[in-house]
Image (tube, helix red, strand yellow):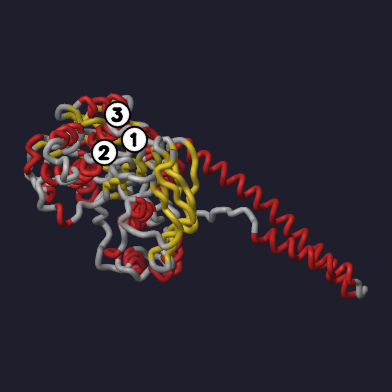
Amino acid sequence: MSLVIASGLTIAHGANTVLADVGFTIGENDRIGLVGANGSGKSSLLVTLAGRHEADAGTLAMRRGLTIAMAEQEVPPTLLPVPLYEAALDALPAAVSDEEAWKVDVILESLGFPWEFRERPLSALSGGWQRLALIARARLPEPDLLLLDEPTNHLDLAKILHLERWLEEEVRGPLVMVSHDREVLDRCTTRTLFLRDAKLYDFPGGYTAARQLLVEHDLAAARARESEEVEIKRLARSAKRLALWGKVFDNEKFSRRARSMEKRLEKKKADVTYVAPADRRNLELAEGESQANILLRCRDLTVAMPNGDPLFRIERLALARGDRAVIMGANGTGKSTLLRHLLHEYQNHGDRIAEASTVYFNPQVVAGYFDQDLSRLPDDKAMFGFFTGSFPVSDGRVRSELIRAGFPHLEQTRRIGTLSGGERARLLFLLLKFEEPNLLILDEPTNHLDVDGRERLEDEILTHELTTIMVSHDRRFVDGIANRFFVVDRGRLIETDGTGSFYDSLLVG
């Protein structure tokens, strides 16, 4: 039975139409993943389904009495000063809040909230805990349909794993989830809607299975379009020939046939199979040359907090050309601190002798650093001016590279500080391309990337066989490119065979 039936639905942001004349249904057993590029309109569709925004055209029919709840991406300002327990309790209908207050304790415990967080205002919680608080609020009234907008954003890996298990085991009803996390989509959804070019493409299965069906659909559409174009050209030639004969021989029969064929031609042109245009936002990396075998070596290194408190120790780590190493560990163990320390050593002590150094970079190393805060990009500079002022390259090269990264000519004078997180991430990868590193230091590189961006980054690293040391909570990304695995365990960094045992330990913990 259908809970929601959309027909001719159109949603626009000013002159930008994000959904054009689409139809779809949501059934009582549907667990839907909504996938699309950053800015494609996924959140706008959720907001419309939640009744917080009216569609510009079309109808959205709901089953009588249907209740819908949505976990948005950001905490509303009015909730920030409210203690966690009260914010959750407020989500229950007023008529039952007293007798069902026990549900608040249950859901907060099931989502992993420490008991002492109950009286803390939401503003005092980290971004990850705030996100889980919003999910708890949406789930508490037990809606008929649950809408989740990027539920894993700001969550560390342990929280992602717990949320994933909670969605599998505790949320049995229908849901629609916007997410770029392919692993969560595969585990928690059974149907996928791809939002692309203001159209929806509907396929059964989680992300991986549905993506393969989308690829097959695109290939079939391209083949059909090619065949149609051949037929259109044939009809055009025939119509032109008949029209000429009718004129030369003054033959009305030929002229009538020509007019009839021209009508068929116009109908053919109007009914051609739609082929989605290629995404022009390229994500490319350039590999710098290196003949060295060992690019980075750490020996007897203590990784410490800024105040000097030790976090963990590295007895020995050697990174060879072609290694793609991932550093794993529970939240707060110092993974990002290690990457920042390596960058500091590279920038300030590159001339150290290998035998006498705790951190040694081969003199041939050109390191490229991606920081999760995107702080390498200056907010106050325009894109075009930043690159022309940073690299000895022509203005034309900078303009063309920015266009390839998804920034049209007219936007290239925008200040970097006005860009979205996804746009800034693409710009930082373009910076790495200009730097041509032969060693990548990546700190949560997929945080601001949509699914296509994550897959393109994987392809670039694997195609160029780029040497990489990284921290990432994106399991699909890690499993796709890493060939060496290190975990922070009881104050030491040790090498392991893979990710499985570490993921299991986070769930147990």
The residue lying at 62 percent from left, 49 percent from top is 222
Residue 75 is situated, as x and y percent measured from the top left of the image, at 20, 52
Q: Are marks 2 and 1 in contact (CB under 8 Å)?
A: yes
The mark lying in front, picked from 3 and 1, is 1
Give the secondary structure at mark 3.
helix
* Residue under pointer 1: 173
* Residue under pointer 2: 142
> Is 471 left or right of 403, judged from the image as shown?
left
- Identified by mark 2, the residue type is Glu
Residue 48 is situated, as x and y percent measured from the top left of the image, at 36, 54
| Quadrant containing the C terminus in the rendered view | top left
Residue 113 seen in the figure: no
Q: Are marks 3 and 1 in contact (CB under 8 Å)?
A: no
* Residue under pointer 3: 169
Of residues 9 and 17, the one nearer the viewer is: 9
- Identified by mark 1, the residue type is Gly
The residue lying at 11 percent from left, 35 percent from top is 114
Q: Is 405 situated above or below 82?
A: below
